[in-house]
């Protein structure tokens, strides 16, 4: 079986109808379990107090904000190279999800940063690149809406996605590129001195797994919706031509 079989809209829809219910359930259990574990069954940090527990929303949402854009990039490149419409629609479907994840990351980062830094916002390299990524999400969605021809829209948004990937990389690795800035290092690291303590890490892993599944669920669901909307538009266009 080849992955390219799922470029067939009918096969894609049949497959997603089977896998969506268990994925919905698994994502809900993981997110609820991780948040309850993290917020109610972990101690306060010795320096940050209870504020540290926002990590269970901030880190998973930031993770998905960045990786959603990379998923859009891969789907866009598949469209450009192989002209599979499902991949273009998947990229379009992922954009609003990535936008919301980026917004959650920015808001929770501000809430976390205010008691730690004494300010809601700072022009820190990672924060700034995240804000620019948020604007790229808005531009990507707006570009899809502004162009009537779907193939032309897919082509232009693919170019925008490629350019925006620079800021997705910066959002992920800005702390490594620049030593200056208020933002802390990576919460999860192979370096034991930098990595968050295990008591916080384990529920964080659960939350991250839940957010990843939740992202997959939303993208699959929205891609199916985009396919059905495209079919409906094609049917309406045929009816108008036949009249």
Image (tube, rainbow, N blue to C red):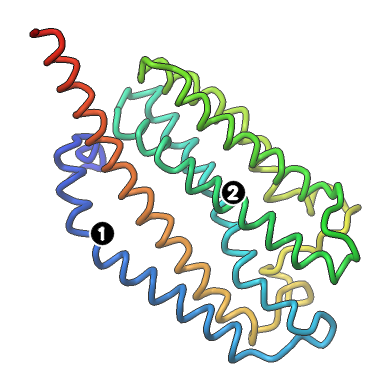
Horizontal and vertical percent position of residue 210: 45, 68
Q: Residues within 10 Å of mark 1 (few under 14, many from 20)?
A: some
Closest to the camera, between mark 1 and mark 2, is 1
Name the residue beneath numbered marker 2: 66
Q: Is residue 16 left or right of residue 60?
A: left
Depth order, front residue of 78/15: 15
Earlier sequence position, callout 1 versus callout 2? 1
Horizontal and vertical percent position of residue 53: 67, 78
Horizontal and vertical percent position of residue 213: 40, 62
- Image quarter where the C terminus lies is top left
Up the image or down, 79 lies above or below 103; here it is above
Q: Which mark is residue 20?
A: 1
Name the residue at the front extreme.
243
Up the image or down, 72 lies above or below 209; here it is above
Give the residue displayed 67% in from the left and 72% down from the top. 54
Horizontal and vertical percent position of residue 8: 19, 35
Q: Is residue 3 left or right of residue 169?
A: left
């Amino acid at each position: 079986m080849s992955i390219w079989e799922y470029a067939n809209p009918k096969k894609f829809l049949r497959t997603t109808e089977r896998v969506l219910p268990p994925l919905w359930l698994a994502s809900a259990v993981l997110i609820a379990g991780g948040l309850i574990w993290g917020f109610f069954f972990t101690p306060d940090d010795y320096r940050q107090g209870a504020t540290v527990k926002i990590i269970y929303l901030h880190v998973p949402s930031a993770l998905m904000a960045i990786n959603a854009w990379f998923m859009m990039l891969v789907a866009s490149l598949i469209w450009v190279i192989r002209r599979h419409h499902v991949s273009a629609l998947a990229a379009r479907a992922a954009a609003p999800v990535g936008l919301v994840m980026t917004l959650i990351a920015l808001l929770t980062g501000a809430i976390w940063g205010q008691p730690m830094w004494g300010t809601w916002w700072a022009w820190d390299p990672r924060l700034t690149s995240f804000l620019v990524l948020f604007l790229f999400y808005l531009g990507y969605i707006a570009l899809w809406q502004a162009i009537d021809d779907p193939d032309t829209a897919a082509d232009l948004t693919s170019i925008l996605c490629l350019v925006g990937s620079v800021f997705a990389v910066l959002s992920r690795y800005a702390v490594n590129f620049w030593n200056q800035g208020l933002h802390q290092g990576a919460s999860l690291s192979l370096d034991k001195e930098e990595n968050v303590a295990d008591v916080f890490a384990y529920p964080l892993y659960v939350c991250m797994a839940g957010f990843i599944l939740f992202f997959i669920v939303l993208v699959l669901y929205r891609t199916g919706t985009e396919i059905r909307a495209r079919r409906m538009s094609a049917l309406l266009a045929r009816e108008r031509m036949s009249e």
